[in-house]
Image: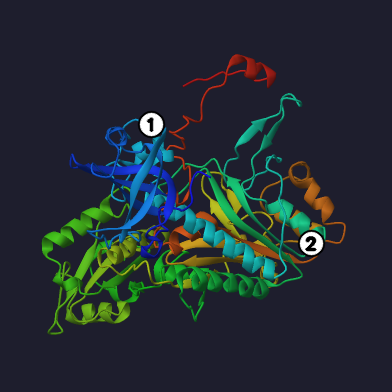
Amino acid sequence: MYRTHSNGELRLTNVGQEVTLVGWVQKTRDKGFMMWVDLRDRYGITQLIFDEDRTPKEMMEKAKTLGREFVIQVKGEVIERVSRNSNISTGDIEILVKELTILNKSLVPPFTIEDETDGGDELRMKYRYLDIRRNPVRENLIFRHKVAIEVRKYLSDKDFIEVETPVLIKSTPEGARDFVVPSRMNAGQFYALPQSPQTFKQLLMVGGLDKYFQIVKCFRDEDLRADRQPEFTQIDCEMAFVEQEDVLNTFEGLTRHLLKEINGVEVADFPRMTYDEAMKKYGNDKPDIRFGMEFGELNEVAKHKEFSVFNNAELVVGIAVPGGNSYTRKEIDKLIEWIKRPQVGALGMVYSRCNDDGTFKSSVDKFYDEADLAKWAEITGAKAGDLICVLSGNTDKVRTQLSALRMELATRLGLRKPNEFAPLWVVDFPLLEWDEESKRFHAMHHPFTSPKPEDMHLLDTDPGKVRANAYDMVLNGNEIGGGSIRIHDKATQALMFDHLGFTPEEAKDQFGFLMNAFEYGAPPHGGLAFGLDRLVAILGGQETIRDFIAFPKNNSGRDVMIDAPSKIDETQLKELNLKLDLKL
């Protein structure tokens, strides 16, 4: 055996035992006549001691050659430490080394393998195999493992069956761009990597499996953001013979289970909010409800004066910032600069101070008196000591801008506490959304989402008003999962394709296999997919999914460690019947 114990295992009860340990050299401390080495593995750190009085000269000289990240094996006796270290679990003992074997030497690592490292993101991604040796990264991956185990345990106990679906599939229009894979055996034809197993899980319901789940890789060739990866992992689920309430109850239960087992948190309430209500109160469809600052719409109390900025706006809306009256004019000016950034896009901001004596002082005192400003405070819920921030303009744009400001202020005020969890169901999404570029409606979720039966009559007359049988699970201001009740009959699915601009021929070419399946007794069904990466990050008190992925891509979609994507040689191109004609 390479080892008898791990480096996080030994205690005072082991004193006097002969042990064998292996691991990496964390650091060395050489006093000349005595030397200490911190030996690290996945489980912890154990201190080794080499002593001129008790260590042979040859071994002492060998120990002095050890560098950071050398892989070594030692045999020795567990002894009690004279100077104990309460910061590590093995801090009461050390190993008096009797045998030392260098299993592998190491170059000096490009950054320190410590909890607080001197390596930047790009450097650590290039040497990710070294970064994984650091406690925070390793603990994140172990945390992800624990979440996945609890997911499988919960769903299996609820009679769900885990089924693997294909990775090489047909390219279909589901929203994002597909990654495509050329077929050598079928010249000129391509597979696609799945954006989700959507059609396959529906086919599994047609197949009578009743309850399906899969922890599955998905792929989308999208423009990347800080919290988006080209390949990501879903907890993909589908159920037959269910209505929306059945799905919500099942996955509310899964979320409760994870919060309790992983975080030790009991959540009593899973409120529900319609999409329209979320947009009106918070300006987005994934609101963080751990704090207030709900929107107050001010059209009725702000458009009656000669202030053209408000009078010409479609929407005037504000929020109350708790304690914001303490902001200096310079701080408010910086806040206005922040919302004018291209990423937010506001043209400016009006504000009103709520003074402790009940009076108000605003940036538009020329147009609005105390009575007007008191109405602003009443509508936004502002109290003495608060600051009212007001934006105006196009309804959709101004809601998005104020939502960004709300989240930024909450972060600055410390209101987004990672150890607090506030789940929320957002329901009744629009079925379709208008795209200005293509001048037609697109499915807000995907083409297989069922319309609300009571809204079906609006499909021909007012398609933008049709609500979907769709729902999102939101946790701490992040969408962690979404799903819908699906269309399960051919006639309704054909009608949906028609309203999405597919000709019958295009629909048959793209989704003929699904339409055919619906003619063989397809049951009513619905489901949901959780984003595992984001769910794990939030449960872990963070919001960056990359920290919980073993080998992530950077913001350009590159794996800088293995240098991918990369070119392939001419021989491979010929085998695949491909010819490059790049115009860069």
| Whether residue 503 is visible | yes
Q: Residue furthest bottom?
A: 357
Q: Is residue 127 rendered to the left or right of residue 431?
A: left
- Mark 2 crowdedness (10 Å alpha carbons): few <14, some 14-19, many ≥20: some
How many marks the image carries: the answer is: 2
Q: Find disc 1 in the rendering and name its residue.
A: 105
Q: Dot 1: what SS?
A: loop
- Vertical position of residue 342 compared to residue 325: above or below: above
- Vertical position of residue 357 compared to residue 517: above or below: below
Question: Residue 468: x, y in percent?
Answer: 63, 65
Q: Is residue 199 rendered to the left or right of residue 12?
A: right
In this rendered view, identify the residue nearer to me: 153 or 370: 153
Q: How is the image coloured?
A: rainbow
- Residue type highlighted by circle 2: Leu
Question: Residue 158: x, y in percent?
Answer: 69, 71
Q: Quadrant of residue 401?
A: bottom left
Question: Residue 380: x, y in percent?
Answer: 31, 77
Cβ–Cβ under 8 Å for marks 1 and 2: no
Q: Quadrant of residue 360?
A: bottom left
Quote the CA–CA distance across marks 1 and 2: 53 Å
In this rendered view, identify the residue nearer to me: 44 or 562: 44
- Whichever of callouts 1 and 2 sits on the residue coming sooner in the sequence is 1
Query: What residue is drawn where x is 60% and y is 52%?
Result: 442
Give the number of the mark in front: 1 or 2.
1
- Residue type highlighted by circle 1: Lys
- Vertical position of residue 491 compared to residue 510: above or below: below
Question: Residue 443: x, y in percent?
Answer: 61, 54
In this rendered view, identify the residue nearer to me: 76 or 290: 76
Q: In the rendered structure, find residue 285 and report the number of the disc placed on it.
A: none
Q: Find disc 2 in the rendering and name its residue.
A: 209
